Image (cartoon, rainbow, N blue to C red):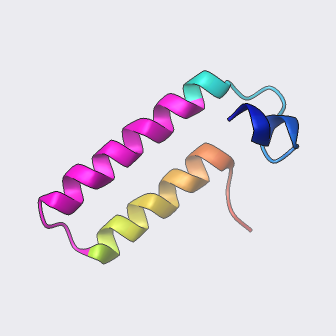
Amino acid sequence: MRKPIADGELDIEADAAGLASVTSAVMHSLAVRARAGEPRQALDKLSGVAIDLICGKRR
C-alpha cells in the first residue's frame, strides 16, 4: 500500500498497514465464501465494494 500512496493513487494520509490488513481480510473472506459455494455475482459485488472502501469510490 505504500507504493500507491507514494504514487498518489491513495490519499497521502492513508494508513498503509491498516489498508493492507483490510485487504488481506477481504481476500480471505472471498476465498472462504467461494469455497463455500457463494455465487460469482455475489463475490464480484463484495470485491467491488471492498475496492471502493480501500481505494475510494471508483468513478
Looking at the image, is 40 positioned above or below residue 36?
A: below
The question of residue 38 being in magenta is answered with yes
Up-down: is 13 above or below 54?
above
> As drawn, which residue projects farthest toward the left?
36
Residue at image coords 50%, 63%: 48
Q: Main secondary structure of the magenta part?
A: helix
- Residue positioned 48% across, 35% down in the render: 22
Q: Quadrant of the C terminus?
A: bottom right
- In the picture provided, is 8 more to the left or to the right than 14? right
Q: Is residue 5 magenta?
A: no
Boundaries of the magenta span: 19-39
Identify the residue at horizontal 29%, vertical 46% (top origin). Answer: 29
**Left-right relation of 40 to 11:** left
Q: Position of residue 20 (x, y in %)?
A: 55, 32
Q: Quadrant of residue 39?
A: bottom left
Q: Residue at x 84, y 31 (%)?
A: 12
The percent coordinates of residue 23 (x first, y second) are 49, 40
Relative to 32, does residue 1 appear above or below in the rendering?
Answer: above
Quadrant that contains the N terminus: top right
Q: Is residue 5 left or right of residue 24?
A: right
- Residue 33, how many percent across, how many down? 21, 56
Q: How far across and down, in percent of the image, does residue 17 sit?
A: 60, 23
